[in-house]
Image: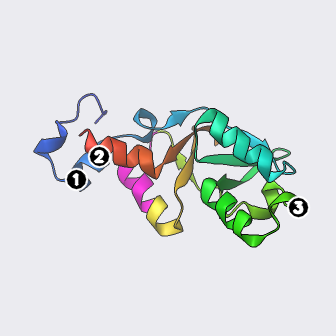
Amino acid sequence: MSSDDAPQGRDMTLPEWLSSRVVADFANDGILTCPAEAPLEEVAWMMVENRVHALVVADGADEGQVISDADLIAAADSGHFDELAARDVAGTEAVGVGRDDTLMRATQLLAEHGVTHLVVRDGEGRPTGILSTLDVARAISRR
């Protein structure tokens, strides 16, 4: 069932509703990346400038980690903020979810991996966007 054909949210339980909606309808399109060697001050600036809470750390063709604002706060607390680069503090492996996967699957991945952001991938595995816990909460609040 496509999201357009699904019954209205209040007619279903939350798990039913999450299972009837696809990630592509709620994810942010486009991937914001930072170089692995980027100084943390630059990473912070990129997050603020783009109004996001996380970036994908790009190390060549590999998009293997996500750096979040929480990672920046932890680095600031370490006393070594100015000496560190994105690759040094990126806290979580980039967990992927398919564009056509359900929001239920996305919530399961978020919970299983203890992450706040998923890299959304197309059918060929290419990254196409980001889905955050805030995106899921926003979707739930509007069902």
Q: Residue at x 52, y 57 (%)?
A: 116
Between 45 and 112, the one nearer to me in the picture: 45
The structure residue drawn at horizontal position 61% and vertical position 32%, both measured from the top left corner, is 30
Report the amino acid beneath label 2. Answer: Ile
Q: Cβ–Cβ below 8 Å for labels 2 and 1?
A: yes
121 on left or right of 84: left
What percent of the width, then of the height, locates residue 83? Answer: 88, 61
Amino acid tagged 1: Leu
Q: Do callouts 3 and 2 mark residues in contact (Cβ within 8 Å)?
A: no
The segment highlighted magenta reads 100-108
Cα–Cα span, label 2 and label 1:
8 Å
Q: In the rendered view of the protein, which quadrant contains the C terminus? A: top left
Using the image, determine if residue 8 lies above or below residue 77. above
How many neighbours does mark 2 have within 10 angstroms: few (below 14), some (14-19), or many (20 or more)? some
Give the crowd class for mark 3: few <14, some 14-19, many >=20 residues within 10 Å: few
Q: Separation of disc 3 and disc 1 at Cα?
A: 45 Å
Q: Where is mark 3, residue-wise?
A: 83
Q: Secondary structure at mark 3?
A: helix
Question: Is residue 102 magenta-colored?
Answer: yes
Q: Position of residue 124 (x, y in %)?
A: 63, 39
Could you say whether the residue bearing mark 2 is in a helix, strand or loop?
Answer: helix
Whether 91 is among the magenta residues is no
Of the residues under marks 2 and 1, which one precedes in the sequence? 1
Q: Which mark sits nearer the N-terminus, 3 or 2?
A: 3
Cα distance, mark 3 to mark 2?
40 Å
Per the image, the residue denoted by label 2 is 140
Residue 79 quadrant:
bottom right
Q: At label 3, which amino acid type do we have?
A: Glu
Q: Earlier in the sequence, mark 3 or mark 1?
A: 1
Q: Which residue is mark 1?
A: 14
